[in-house]
Amino acid sequence: MIGITDDVKYLGSWILPSGNSVDVYLLPHRPGDPPGLRHVVLRADEPPSPSWPSEDFEYYQRVIVPGLAAAFVSADGVPEGG
């Protein structure tokens, strides 16, 4: 479990067709990491795996991944397209 602090940014939550819930957080840069490296934590009732129903995997690819990309750009202060 991660501790939520001002340095941890909430990127979003999604509920997959099966009812599985996914929450995603962006962690701060860690000392010693290369410049620009950020860590993302995905917390799910059932983490992504081959056992996911195909509808959940499709939803993850079609909805969550693009949503995360947009949330990351916004949270990290990077202009879209840059």
Image: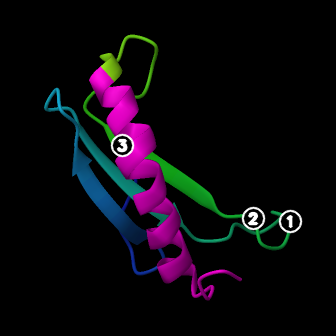
Q: Quadrant of residue 34?
A: bottom right
Kindly check if marks 1 and 2 are in contact, taking CB atoms under 8 A apart as contact.
yes
Rounded to the nearest angstrom, the CA distance separating label 1 from label 2 is 6 Å
Instruction: Kindly identify which numbered label has been placed on residue 77.
Output: none
Viewer-proximal residue among 78 and 32? 78
Residue 13 rendering spot, x and y as whole percentages: 26, 55
| Residue at image coords 46%, 13% | 50
Q: Answer few, some or many: residues within 10 Å of disc 1's Cα (few below 14, many 20 plus, some between 14 and 19).
A: few
Instruction: Kindly identify which numbered label has been placed on residue 37.
Output: 2
Residue 73 rendering spot, x and y as whole percentages: 55, 76
Instruction: Characterize the magenta stretch by its predominant secondary structure.
Output: helix
Can residue 62 be seen in this snapshot? yes
| Residue at image coords 36%, 50% | 63
Q: Earlier in the sequence, mark 3 or mark 2?
A: 2
Rounded to the nearest angstrom, the CA distance separating label 1 from label 3 is 24 Å
Q: Give the amino acid type for the residue marked by disc 2 in the picture.
A: Leu
* Residue on which disc 1 sits: 34
Q: Secondary structure at mark 3?
A: strand
Q: Secondary structure at mark 1?
A: loop
Residue 33 rendering spot, x and y as whole percentages: 81, 63
Q: Answer few, some or many: residues within 10 Å of disc 3's Cα (few below 14, many 20 plus, some between 14 and 19).
A: some
| Residue at image coords 52%, 70% | 72
User: Quick check: 78 above or below 13?
Assistant: below
Q: Give the amino acid type for the residue marked by disc 3 in the picture.
A: Arg
User: Quick check: 34 above or below 79?
Assistant: above
Residue lying farthest top? 51
* Residue on which disc 3 sits: 43
Please provide the residue range marked out in magenta. Answer: 55-82
Is residue 8 magenta-colored?
Answer: no
Rounded to the nearest angstrom, the CA distance separating label 3 from label 2 is 20 Å
User: Quick check: 5 above or below 57?
Assistant: below
